[in-house]
Amino acid sequence: MSADGRPAGSPPAGAGAQPVPLDKATWHRLHPLSPVIRAGRALIGVVVVFVGTLVPGSQGGRGSVFGHLVFGAALVLLGLVSWLVTRWRVQDGDLRIETGLIRRSSLRFPLSQIQAIDIVRPALARIFGLAELRLRTGGSGGNAGRLAYLTAPEADIVRAQLLALARGGEADTAPSGERVLVSVPVGRLVGSIVLSGAALVVLLVGIGLAVGALVAPAGAIAVIGSSGAVGLGLLTMLWRRFNGGYNLTVAEAPDGLRVRSGLIDTTAETIPGGRVQAVRMVEPLLWRPLGWCRLEVDVAGSHRGSGENTPESRQLRAVLPVGTHEEAERLLSRILPDAPGDRSPAPPRARFKSPLRFHNLSWGHNETCAVTTTGRLARVTAWVPLTKVQSLRLVQGPVQRGLRLATVYLDTAGRSVHAAIRDRDAGEAGQDLVELTDLCRAARQSGRLPKPPPGPSEGGLQDAAAGPSSSS
């Protein structure tokens, strides 16, 4: 026995998590169970059908059982072939992923264009101790690089090495320090879901069905049968909101903000400095008496999941599903330290054009960022860094022309956050358009990006270089 209690000759503690060499001459394979995890819920359905044929008294006889065995063997063989023909390595500054037997596919992802690498662990993957790496690049397409699946320790190590290579350094797996900024309590999360519009719809529908069942049972059954899919969709949306915000923690680290969350399907994402296209704060009507709000970011690059984690496809990330204004301001100060605070309201005559949202209309700007506020029931505030503005548009509808009003739109690459300076005086809107165009051009030419304050490490947060933007 060794000094630490392990059998003599056994590998040292942590040997299973040794760094995977990312050299040019070595191809790496995914975990052998990757086809099983990718099959996900479909595989569970196949297993249930197969087990049903083995139950005594089931129809089909030996022929049915033999057929299911052949079908199962074919699935196993296809999964084995898929695993054997899939490999990956780092070569000439690119992550190269090859797959396919008859139709060979070779994908290359330049490490220099990587925005972030997220670790996703669906429920089935967690059972087997596996994790998926998702590469997010600056493009808006949904075809992002995926390494699905690796063991959880190996995924952490490979992610750290790829990020180090993306920054131009050597592969490094040394853990970096982080400081927790915000954690969302489960009770507050549940309360926010209960007070959401979807939950109120489910509640009203449930009450209506209960009353209908007492008055006309046959009619209630018919309604449930015809609208069951809609109700299931609402419940699924509520569950995703709960799972996505469960135990959510935002921490500050040298590579950006790290967001971890999830109950069944867990996700660990990193939002690098300088990659945020826009920030949005939503204050629903029912949350306002409690002082709650939701903070979301639009990050460059998107990933549409496939397989078991398809519901996770989105580009807008809630870094604070529900929190206080103090927590939202704390996160905003790390994401956009130069976010403007002062805003000017819309002219009084805008009340005739937008009576419900007039009290929320305002906007402001400085040399690096613009902020707009709008909303009828829910108040929505959007911050857009001027370096991320792709185009500026002045729009004037027929009602606005009669009231001498106009709206200026600030378009970004993400397009998930719609920042608009609504219902301003027409002359003022024209001047704002010219001024913002000059400010956007000057901000891009000078490379002026919001610089985060010093982080938990000596060098603080490391901003990624901003990509080029088209002119306004």
Image: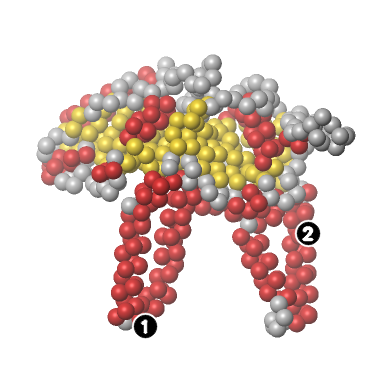
Measured from the top left, where is residue 300 in percent x and y? 48, 35
Residue type marked 2: Leu
Disc number placed over residue 77 in the picture, else none: 2
Residue type marked 1: Ala
Q: Quadrant of the N terminus?
A: top right
Residue 363 shows in this picture: yes
Q: Tell us which disc is closer to us: 1 or 2.
A: 1
Residue 302 in the figure: left or right of residue 176: left
Measured from the top left, where is residue 144 in percent x and y? 58, 41
Query: In the image, what residue occupies the spot 56% across and 45% down?
Result: 266
- Disc 1 crowd, CA 10 A, few/some/many (<14, 14-19, 20+): few
Query: In the image, what residue occupies the spot 70% across and 28% down?
Result: 92
Question: Residue under circle 1?
Answer: 218
Query: In the image, what residue occupies the spot 32% across and 41% down?
Result: 292
196 or 471, which is in the foreground? Answer: 196
Query: In the image, what residue occupies the spot 68% across and 46% down?
Result: 129
How far apart are the two marked residues, 1 and 2, measured between alpha carbons? Answer: 49 Å
377 or 289, which is in the foreground? Answer: 289
- Disc 2 crowd, CA 10 A, few/some/many (<14, 14-19, 20+): few
Image position of 232 with respect to 294: above or below: below
Measured from the top left, where is residue 175 in percent x and y? 63, 27
Image position of 455 with respect to 27: above or below: above
